[in-house]
Image (cartoon, coloured by chain):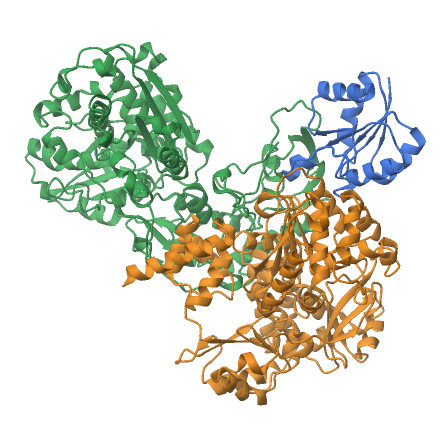
C-alpha cells in the first residue's frame, strides 16, 4: 500500500519538476502544489521531493516550516479560514470576529474541525487594511467582516457557495488619483516608446527622472539597472517584489489588479535595459486570488507580442515573465530574502556586502524592484523624465501611492506628491483629530501630533506608503503590542538581536500592560531596541523596534503605571 | 577574479545564505591589491577582500565570535562580532564584512559594547546554563564570553528548567537543545562541510529551532556519527555519549580484565586537554597514565593498523589480479578503504550501490577487538567473557561501530566501549593525573610497539601512505626510500580535499612467502601505473563518488582512501575542542614526527604482525581465519527515513 | 607625457596610481567624486581619464562615462575599478552601456597600467 503511495507521489513530483524545473528553485512551487493536493506535507512528501531535487529531506522541512502557508504538522481542513490580525484589522474589531468564528465552529485558532472541513488560523496582513476586518478563505477574500456575518460565511462554505456568492477579487477604494493613476496610456503604449530608446538611454531617462525605489528604502532605481545592465552575463533576471507584507499597505494589491499591463511593461522595459530574458513576479501567498488575473494578463501580452521572442519586432529582445507565489512570510519582502525564497531556500536575508544587485537569483545579475517602481518606470519612459520630476521634492521626485487605514473618515488609496506634510495628508483623508500616525507600517515610525508638520519624503519620513491613523481614544500600548507580536512571529529567526530582542520587548509590553514594569527596565528595553536597530542583520530586523521606541518616546505617560482592570 | 566561499564551493550551486564569497588577490604588489584599514586607530594594509575579523586578528585585536568558525561558511547570524565602521549607520558583523575600500573601524565603542552585551544577555536568556553539570564546563564559548563581558546578572531573565530534554538515542551523539543558541554551526557542518544533512533550522521567528528531519531521534536519522557537529558546537548542546561510568565500573570489578587499545590520533592531541599547545604527542606518558587509571593492559591500535595494511593490501592485490588478469568486472576496482566508520556509514546510506568497492577488512579498532578476545585470551588463558575491551579513539563513530551486530566474531562483543580523547582526558583529570608530568612507558606485549605506518593512520592520507610503502616493497622487492626520500610519500600528504598520486611499477620482485598461497608471480603488475586518491570529509567523498559514477578521472584509480572527518582521524569528532585547520596541522606534525622516530616504519616489517600470522592466522592474509575474524560485510542502508 | 585625470574616491589608490604614472613621465590630476571630476574635466582638459566605478553611488563611474560622452568628451577613458571583484560580476566596455575605451579590474600591476595608458594614448 505504502509502496503504491510512494510511486504515485514520485510520479507526481516528476510531473511538477517538468513544470517548475529540476533544481532547488522549483522547491517552493512544488511544495505549494503538493500541499494543495494532500492538505499536508508529510515526511514522505518532503523526503521524496528532497531526493527528486538532490537535496536533503531536512532542508525541505526547513523550508516547509519557514512559510506559514505550508503545513507539516496537521492536515488542514477543506476550508482554511485565515483572519487577519494585523494592526488595521485589529483596530477595526478583529477580536470580536475571531471570537465568533471560534463560537460557531467550536474550535480555537490553530485547530481544525473534527470533520476536516474547517481550519481556523490567524494570518498577518492580508492587504485589506482599509476594509477590515478581513478574512481569507482558501483563495477568496471577505472584507469588513462583522461578527454577525460569520455564521452566514460558514454556511456558504458548507454548501460550497464560496465561488458563486462572493466576487473573485474584492475591489480597492481609490480615493484620490494623481498623474500616475491617471496616466491614460493605452494598452502596449508603455513599452513601445521605451523600445525606441537605446538601453543606456532608458537608464538615463530613469536617472533623470530621479526615480527611487517605491518599496520604502528609496534606492535610486537607475543605479540598480545600470549595474545589472553593464554586467557582462548571458543570464540576468528582473524580479518584481509583489510581496507586499508591510502591515497597513495595500496599494500593490490594487496596482497588481488595475495596472497589470503597466507593471508588466515596466518589467519588460527593465529586462530590455539590463539585458535580461526572464522576469519573476513574486506574488505574496496572501494574494493567491490575483494569480488567475495575472496569468491571464501575462498570456494576453504574449499573444500581443509584448512578451516572448523579438518583442515589438525588436530582433534579439526576448523577455518573459513567470509568476512565483510566496507562502506567508513577511520577511520575503526584503529583497535578498525574496531571492533566497525564489531559490527554494528559507527566506533569510543574506549578508551585505555583497549587495543584492551584485548577487542575484542563482548568482546572476538581478534587479529587484517594487510593483509601483516598475509602473512608474513604464510611465516615465512613455511621458518623459521631466513630466515625472515636476511632482515631489528635489530629493524625492514624483508622486507616491499611499495606503491609508485606521481611524479616519476616508480610508483607501491616495496618490499624492512627495513632500506632503502629515497634517495635509490627514486633512485629505479625514483624520484631523488623530493623536498619532504610523508611517511606514510595522517597521516604520509612530509620529505624534506635535510632529505632524513633518514631510513625507525620502529626506524626512521615508515610507513604502503605509499610513495608519490612530484616533484620540486609541491605546498606544496595544498598538505597540500588536506590532511586536507581528515581529516576534515574522522575524526570520536567524540573527540574535531580532529573533530574541523582539520577544523581550513583547514581554516588556506585557509587563507594562500589567503595570509591572520599572522605568529602569523600560530604559533597558529602549537600549535593547537601539541594539536591535544597530546590530540586526537585515533592514527589517533593524527597523523592528522602531514602532515600540517611538511609542515609548512619545506616549510614556500613557503607558507607565497602569492598573489593569480586574478580570 | 571570481570569489568563492572556501567551504561550499560550486558543487552545491548557490547555497547563498551561508555562501558568503570572500576573495583575496594573489598578486599583492598590484596597485589596489592591498587596502589600508584602520582599526582602533592603528592602520594596517590587508589584501582586498580580507574580512574585518581577519584583519583584526592579524593585528592581535580580539573580536569575539560565536557563529563564525574557521572551517565553515560565513553566516553572520549571531552578531556578537559587530563593530562600528565609520560612515555606516549600523554596526557591521566583522566576520562577514570584506574590506574593499579604506575604512576606519572601531571595535569597542559604547554602541559596540552595548550591542555585544545585549546579544550575550539575549542568548543567556534562552540558554539552559547549568554550567556545573555540563560536559563543556570550562571549555564553552558562551561561558567564556559571559566571563569576558563581565555578565553578573541575567538582564533578560534566565532558563532554570530544561524544556526539551536530551536526546540520548544515538550511540554516539547526544543532543541537548536546551543549550542551543542557534548559531547554526551544526547545520553548516552537517549540510555544507559533511553533506550529510541531519540538521536544519526549522520554523521562523520565536519558534526558530534547530531540528532533525521529522523531529526524529538521532538514532532514526541518517547520521554517520562523525561528530563534526560536536567539535564545532560552541556550547554543550551537542556532545558525545560518554561510556566512562561503565568503564570505571569494569575497572573496579576485580573479575574483569580491562584492556585498552589506543589509536594514533588521540596521543597527538590529548595534551591539549592538559594545557599544551596542539602538536605535542604524549604517547608514552599516556601509557603510564592509563595503567595508573587501572587498565590492565595498554595496547597500541597501530598494531592492528599494520595488520589492516596487510589484510587490505592483500585484498587490493587480489582485486587487481581479478581485474587485470581475469578481466573480472565484478572485482570492483577502485577499492575503497574501510577504516573510517563514519565513511562506511556514509556510503551505506548514500551510495549503497557502490558498497562492493569497500574493502571487507574491518577497521583497526574492530580487528584488534576480535584478536584480544581470541588470540590474546588464548595466550594469556583468560576467559574472553571476562575481558572488557576499551578503544581510545579520536572518533565518535567508533561508538556506533563497536555496537554493530556483525562485530561479534570473537563470539563476544569484540570492542565493548569506544572512548574519545576528550572522555579519557576527563577520566584522567578525575584521578588527579597530570598527564604532562607522567613518566614514559611502553605498550604491552604481545602486540608491542607498532610501526610508523600505523601511526600515520591518524592523518588524512596516512592509510594510503602506509599501503604504498608496503605494497610497493612487497611487489617490487625494492625499498620505498628509493622512490620517496625518508619514505615520505608526500603526494598523498596535506589537507587538500581530494589528492591523487600515481606510482609506476617498473620492475617486480619475487612473491614474498606470506603471499605465496595467493599469487603465482608479480609479472602482471609490471608496467602498471598504480593510481591512488585520498579524500577527507564526506563532502569530498561525495565528489569522488560522483566522479567515479560519471566515469571521470577518479574512476581510473585502483585504491582510494576515504576519511569521514576533515583532516582524517586527527580531526575526529572525539578530539579536543576547538578544532581548526591550524590545530589539525599541528597534530599532523606530531604524528609524522612519531612516524619518523619509529624504529620500524613499514607495516609488513612489524614483528608482532609476522608473529600473529605464524602463530594464529596460519593461512595467511585473507585466509579463512582472518576472513572470519578480521573481515566483515556491509549493509545497504539507503537514505529513506520514511 | 600626457595630462591624465583620475577620478576615484579611494585616496590611497589615487596616490599609488599617481606615483606610477608620474614615474612614467605623465602629469596627473585627481578628483575624488563624480561631481568634482566633471568640473576637473572642464578645467584640465585631460588627454586621458582614469575612472573608478563605485564612488558615492555604486554606479557613479558608469553614469559619468555617459555624461562625458554626452558632453562630447572624445579622449580615451580607462575605467579602473574593483566593482567586479567586489560584486563577483564581470564588467567590460560596451559601446552602449559603458562607453569607455578600456575596462581594467583593480588590483592592477603597475606595468599593465602603464602599458594600457600608453596603448590608449597611442590610439
Residue B514 horizontal side relative to residue A11, left or right: left
Left or right position of C115 against B535: right
Chain rendered green: B
Q: Relative to B242, say whether B584 is above or below.
A: above
Q: Can residue B237 be seen in this view?
A: no
Q: Position of residue A197 (x, y in %)?
A: 80, 46
Tint applied to chain C in the drawing: blue
Quarter of the view holding residue A515: bottom right
Q: In the displayed image of the protein, which residue is found farthest to the right?
A: C43
Q: Where is residue B615 in the image (x, y as percent from the top left)?
A: 8, 25
Horizontal side of A417 relative to B48 (left or right) equals right
Instruction: Name the residue furthest bottom.
Output: A148
Where residue B125 appears, as percent x and y from the top left, is 51, 61
**In-front residue for pair A541/A65:** A65
Above or below B48: residue A22: below
In the drawing, does residue C119 fall left or right of residue A327? right
Q: In which quarter of the image is the C terminus of chain B?
A: bottom left
- At 85% from the left and 61% from the top, the residue drawn is A392
Would you identify the image quadrant in which residue A170 lies?
Answer: bottom right
Quadrant of the snapshot with the N terminus of chain B = top right
Q: Position of residue A523 (x, y in %)?
A: 66, 65
Chain shaded orange: A
Q: How many marks?
A: 0
Residue B296 occupies which quadrant of the picture?
top left
What's the residue at 93%, 33% (across, down)?
A: C42
Front residue of B398/B138: it is: B398
In the displayed structure, C84 sits above or below B153; it is above
State whether residue A137 appears in this view. Answer: yes
What residue lies at 77% left-to-right and 53% top-to-bottom?
Answer: A192
Amino acid at each position: 500500500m505504502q509502496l503504491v503511495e510512494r510511486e504515485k507521489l514520485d510520479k507526481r513530483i516528476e510531473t511538477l519538476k517538468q513544470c517548475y524545473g529540476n533544481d532547488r528553485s522549483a522547491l517552493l512551487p512544488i511544495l505549494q502544489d503538493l500541499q494543495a493536493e494532500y492538505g499536508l506535507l508529510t515526511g514522505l512528501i518532503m523526503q521524496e521531493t528532497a531526493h527528486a531535487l538532490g537535496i536533503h529531506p531536512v532542508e525541505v522541512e526547513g523550508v516547509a516550516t519557514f512559510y506559514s502557508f505550508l503545513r507539516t504538522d496537521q492536515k488542514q481542513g477543506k476550508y482554511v479560514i485565515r483572519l487577519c490580525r494585523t494592526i488595521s484589522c485589529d483596530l477595526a474589531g478583529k477580536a470580536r470576529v475571531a471570537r465568533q468564528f471560534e463560537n460557531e465552529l467550536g474550535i480555537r485558532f490553530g485547530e481544525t474541525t473534527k470533520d476536516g472541513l474547517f481550519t481556523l488560523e490567524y494570518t498577518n496582513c492580508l492587504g485589506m487594511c482599509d476594509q477590515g476586518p478581513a478574512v481569507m478563505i482558501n483563495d477568496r477574500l471577505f472584507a469588513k467582516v462583522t461578527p454577525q456575518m460569520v455564521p452566514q460565511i460558514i454556511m456558504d462554505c458548507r454548501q460550497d457557495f464560496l465561488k458563486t456568492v462572493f466576487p473573485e477579487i474584492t475591489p480597492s477604494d481609490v480615493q484620490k488619483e494623481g498623474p500616475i493613476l491617471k496616466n491614460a496610456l493605452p494598452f502596449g503604449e508603455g513599452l513601445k516608446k521605451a523600445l525606441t530608446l537605446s538601453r543606456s538611454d532608458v537608464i538615463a531617462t530613469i536617472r533623470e527622472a530621479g526615480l527611487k525605489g517605491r518599496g520604502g528604502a528609496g534606492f535610486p532605481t537607475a543605479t540598480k539597472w545600470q549595474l545589472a545592465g553593464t554586467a557582462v552575463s548571458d543570464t540576468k533576471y528582473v524580479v518584481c517584489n509583489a510581496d507586499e507584507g508591510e502591515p497597513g499597505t495595500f496599494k500593490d494589491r490594487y496596482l497588481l489588479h488595475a495596472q497589470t499591463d503597466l507593471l508588466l511593461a515596466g518589467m519588460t522595459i527593465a529586462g530590455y535595459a539590463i539585458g535580461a530574458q526572464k522576469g519573476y513576479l513574486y506574488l505574496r501567498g496572501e494574494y493567491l486570488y490575483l494569480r488567475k488575473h495575472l496569468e491571464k494578463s501575462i498570456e494576453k501580452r504574449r499573444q500581443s507580442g509584448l512578451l516572448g521572442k523579438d518583442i515589438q519586432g525588436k530582433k534579439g529582445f526576448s523577455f518573459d515573465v513567470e509568476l512565483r507565489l510566496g507562502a506567508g512570510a513577511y520577511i520575503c519582502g526584503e529583497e535578498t530574502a525574496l531571492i533566497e525564497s525564489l531559490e527554494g531556500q528559507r527566506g533569510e536575508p543574506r549578508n551585505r556586502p555583497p549587495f543584492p544587485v551584485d548577487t542575484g537569483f542563482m548568482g546572476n545579475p538581478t534587479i529587484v524592484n517594487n510593483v509601483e517602481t516598475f509602473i512608474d518606470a513604464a510611465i516615465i519612459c512613455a511621458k518623459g523624465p521631466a513630466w515625472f520630476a515636476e511632482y515631489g521634492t528635489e530629493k524625492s521626485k514624483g508622486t507616491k501611492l499611499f495606503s491609508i487605514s485606521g481611524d479616519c473618515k476616508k480610508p483607501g488609496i491616495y496618490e499624492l506628491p512627495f513632500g506632503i506634510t502629515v497634517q495635509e495628508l490627514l486633512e485629505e483623508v479625514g483624520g484631523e483629530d488623530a493623536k498619532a500616525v504610523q508611517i511606514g507600517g510595522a517597521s516604520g515610525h509612530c509620529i505624534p501630533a506635535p510632529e505632524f508638520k513633518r514631510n513625507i519624503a525620502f529626506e524626512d519620513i521615508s515610507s513604502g506608503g503605509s499610513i495608519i491613523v490612530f484616533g484620540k481614544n486609541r491605546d498606544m500600548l496595544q498598538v505597540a503590542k500588536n506590532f511586536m507580536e507581528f515581529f516576534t512571529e515574522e522575524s526570520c529567526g536567524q540573527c540574535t538581536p531580532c529573533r530574541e530582542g523582539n520577544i523581550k520587548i513583547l514581554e516588556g509590553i506585557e509587563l507594562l500592560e500589567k503595570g509591572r514594569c520599572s522605568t529602569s527596565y523600560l530604559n533597558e528595553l529602549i537600549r535593547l531596541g537601539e541594539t536591535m536597530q544597530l546590530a540586526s542583520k537585515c533592514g527589517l530586523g533593524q527597523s523592528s523596534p522602531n514602532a515600540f521606541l517611538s511609542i515609548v518616546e512619545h506616549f510614556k505617560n500613557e503607558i507607565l503605571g497602569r492598573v489593569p482592570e480586574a478580570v | 577574479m571570481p570569489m568563492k566561499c572556501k567551504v561550499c564551493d560550486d558543487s552545491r550551486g548557490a547555497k547563498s545564505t551561508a555562501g558568503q564569497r570572500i576573495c583575496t588577490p594573489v598578486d599583492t604588489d598590484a596597485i589596489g591589491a592591498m587596502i589600508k584599514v584602520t582599526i582602533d586607530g592603528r592602520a594596517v594594509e590587508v589584501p582586498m577582500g580580507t574580512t574585518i575579523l581577519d584583519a583584526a586578528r592579524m593585528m592581535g585585536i580580539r573580536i569575539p565570535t560565536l557563529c563564525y568558525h574557521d572551517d565553515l561558511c560565513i553566516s553572520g547570524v549571531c552578531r556578537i562580532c559587530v563593530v562600528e565602521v565609520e560612515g555606516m549607520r549600523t554596526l557591521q558583523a566583522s566576520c562577514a564584512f570584506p574590506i574593499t575600500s579604506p575604512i576606519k573601524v572601531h571595535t569597542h565603542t559604547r554602541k559596540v559594547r552595548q550591542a555585544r552585551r545585549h546579544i550575550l544577555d539575549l542568548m543567556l536568556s534562552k540558554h539552559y546554563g547549568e554550567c556545573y553539570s555540563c560536559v563543556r564546563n570550562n571549555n564553552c564559548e558562551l561561558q567564556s564570553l559571559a566571563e569576558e563581558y563581565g555578565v553578573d546578572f541575567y538582564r533578560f531573565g534566565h532558563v532554570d528548567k530544561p524544556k526539551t530534554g536530551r536526546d540520548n538515542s544515538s550511540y554516539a551523539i547526544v543532543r541537548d537543545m536546551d543549550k542551543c543558541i542557534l548559531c547554526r554551526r551544526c547545520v553548516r557542518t552537517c549540510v555544507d562541510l559533511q553533506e550529510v544533512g541531519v540538521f536544519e533550522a526549522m520554523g521562523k521567528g520565536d519558534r526558530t529551532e534547530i531540528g532533525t528531519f521529522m523531529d526524529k531521534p538521532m538514532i532514526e536519522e541518517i547520521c554517520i556519527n562523525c561528530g563534526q557537529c560536536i567539535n564545532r558546537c560552541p556550547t554543550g548542546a551537542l556532545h558525545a555519549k560518554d561510556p566512562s561510568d561503565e568503564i570505571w565500573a569494569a575497572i573496579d570489578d576485580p573479575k574483569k580484565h580491562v584492556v585498552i587499545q589506543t589509536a594514533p590520533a588521540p596521543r597527538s592531541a590529548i595534551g591539549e586537554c592538559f594545557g599544551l599547545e596542539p602538536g605535542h604527542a604524549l604517547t608514552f606518558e599516556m601509557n603510564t597514565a592509563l595503567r595508573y587509571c587501572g587498565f590492565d593492559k595498554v595496547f597500541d591500535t597501530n598494531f592492528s593498523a599494520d595488520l589492516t595494511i596487510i589484510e587490505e593490501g592483500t585484498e587490493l592485490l587480489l582485486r587487481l589480479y581479478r581485474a587485470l588478469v581475469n578481466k573480472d568486472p565484478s572485482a570492483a576496482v577502485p577499492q575503497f578503504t574501510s577504516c573510517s566508520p563514519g565513511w562506511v556509514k556514509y556510503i551505506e546510506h548514500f551510495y549503497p550501490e557502490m558498497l562492493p568497492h569497500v574493502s571487507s577488512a574491518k577497521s583497526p579498532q574492530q580487528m584488534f577487538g576480535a584478536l584480544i578476545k581470541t588470540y590474546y585470551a588464548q595466550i594469556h588463558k583468560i576467559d574472553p567473557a571476562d575481558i572488557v575491551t576499551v578503544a581510545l579513539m579520536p572518533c565518535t563513530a567508533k561508538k556506533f561501530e563497536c555496537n554493530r551486530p556483525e562485530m561479534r566474531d570473537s563470539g563476544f562483543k569484540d570492542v565493548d566501549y569506544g572512548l574519545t580523547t576528550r572522555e579519557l582526558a576527563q577520566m584522567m583529570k578525575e584521578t588527579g593525573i597530570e598527564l604532562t608530568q607522567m613518566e614514559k612507558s611502553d605498550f604491552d606485549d604481545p602486540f608491542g610497539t607498532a610501526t610508523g605506518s600505523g601511526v600515520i593512520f591518524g592523518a588524512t592520507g596516512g592509510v594510503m601512505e602506509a599501503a604504498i610503502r608496503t605494497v610497493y616493497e612487497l611487489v617490487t622487492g625494492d625499498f620505498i626510500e628509493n622512490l620517496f626520500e625518508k619514505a615520505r610519500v608526500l603526494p598523498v600528504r596535506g589537507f587538500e580535499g581530494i589528492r591523487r598520486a600515481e606510482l609506476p611499477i617498473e620492475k617486480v620482485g619475487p612473491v614474498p612467502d606470506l603471499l605465496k598461497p595467493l599469487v603465482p608471480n608479480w609479472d602482471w603488475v609490471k608496467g602498471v601505473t598504480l593510481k591512488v586518491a585520498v579524500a577527507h570529509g564526506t563532502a569530498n567523498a561525495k565528489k569522488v563518488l560522483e566522479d567515479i559514477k560519471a566515469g571521470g578521472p577518479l574512476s581510473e584509480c585502483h585504491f582510494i582512501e576515504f576519511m569521514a572527518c576533515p583532516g582524517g582521524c586527527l580531526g575526529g569528532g572525539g578530539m579536543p575542542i576547538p578544532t581548526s585547520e591550524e590545530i589539525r596541522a599541528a597534530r599532523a606534525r606530531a604524528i609524522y614526527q612519531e612516524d619518523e622516530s619509529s624504529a620500524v616504519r613499514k607495516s609488513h616489517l612489524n614483528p608482532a604482525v609476522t608473529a600473529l600470522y605464524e602463530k594464529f592466522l596460519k593461512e595467511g592474509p585473507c585466509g579463512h581465519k582472518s576472513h572470519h575474524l578480521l573481515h566483515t560485510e556491509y549493509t545497504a542502508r539507503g537514505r529513506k527515513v520514511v | 607625457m600626457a595630462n591624465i585625470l583620475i577620478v576615484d574616491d579611494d585616496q590611497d589608490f589615487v596616490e599609488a596610481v599617481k606615483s606610477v604614472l608620474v614615474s612614467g613621465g605623465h602629469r596627473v590630476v585627481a578628483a575624488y567624486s563624480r561631481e568634482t571630476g566633471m568640473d576637473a574635466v572642464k578645467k584640465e582638459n585631460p588627454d586621458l581619464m582614469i575612472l573608478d566605478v563605485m564612488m558615492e553611488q555604486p554606479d557613479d563611474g558608469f553614469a559619468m562615462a555617459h555624461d562625458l560622452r554626452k558632453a562630447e568628451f572624445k579622449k580615451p577613458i580607462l575605467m579602473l575599478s574593483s566593482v567586479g571583484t567586489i560584486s563577483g560580476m564581470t564588467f567590460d566596455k560596451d559601446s552602449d552601456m559603458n562607453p569607455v575605451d578600456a575596462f581594467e579590474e583593480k588590483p592592477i600591476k603597475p606595468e599593465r597600467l602603464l602599458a594600457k595608458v600608453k596603448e590608449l594614448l597611442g590610439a
